[in-house]
Image: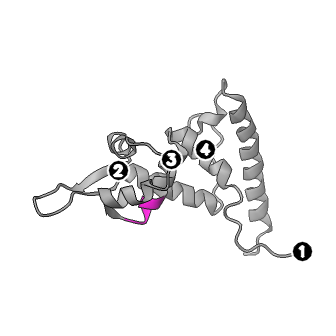
Amino acid sequence: MKSKVNDCLKYWRVIRYFIKQKYGLTTPDLDMLLFLYSEDIFSKEKFQEFNELLPWDKNRFSKLLRDGWIEVFRRSPKKYKTLYGLTFKTQRVISSIYKKLSGEEIPTDMSNNPIFAKNVKFSDKVYKKMIIEMNNAIRQQRRHSPE
């Protein structure tokens, strides 16, 4: 059996679902924030460049700005473009995604994970079960890893 060195995306679907449920993001919005995370400071043109790859939503930029995911970094003086950046909230969420991809457990209490609330949809119950299995697998892997 081959040793899998890099399988950090194994639980990507579960992590993405958790983040979308917790923060009320859509998949295209999350994809956009992940793209912008490495851009640091960006113009509206840079935003539109990646936005062309996503399902059409003419209000995506204004919605992300209004909901506090992106913010104005520098207003436009006459000669320059307005520049934008990710808010501290966005940076925290994206950082959390990378930590979870690297093996951090997803919380299983109702206050930190809406999937674990009492009256949830069937799909939430399925993901709840998978989150528990994922966390168990992470714990098991930590126990067996040589240090």
Sequence order check, earlier mark of 3 and 1 = 1
Q: Residue at x 70, y 71 (%)?
A: 6
Sequence-earlier tag: 3 or 4: 4
Q: Which mark is residue 1?
A: 1
Whether 9 is drawn above or below 61: the answer is below
Q: Looking at the image, which residue sits at the far left?
A: 78
Per the image, the residue denoted by label 2 is 70
The label nearer to you, 3 versus 2, is 3
Q: Amino acid at mark 1?
A: Met
Q: Which mark is first along the chain, 1 or 2?
A: 1
Q: Position of residue 121 (x, y in %)?
A: 68, 28
Amino acid type, callout 2: Ile
Q: Residues within 10 Å of mark 2 (few under 14, many from 20)?
A: many
| Total numbered labels | 4
Would residue 37 be counted in the magenta stretch? Answer: yes
Label 1 near label 4: C-beta < 8 Å? no
Check whether the beta carbons of the residues at disc 3 and disc 2 lie within 8 A of each other: no
- Judging by the rendered image, the residue that carries numbered circle 3 is 55
For marks 3 and 1, give the one nearer the viewer.
Answer: 3
Q: In screen coordinates, is 59 left or right of 103?
A: left
Point out the image quarter for the N terminus: bottom right
Do the residues under discs 4 and 2 have CB atoms within 8 angstroms?
Answer: no
Name which residue lies at 50% across and 58% down. 95
| Bounds of the magenta segment | 35-39
Residue 79 is a magenta residue: no
The span from disc 2 to disc 1 (Cα, nearest Å) is 45 Å
Image coords of residue 18 (percent x, y): 61, 44
Residue denoted by label 4: 18
The span from disc 3 to disc 1 (Cα, nearest Å) is 40 Å
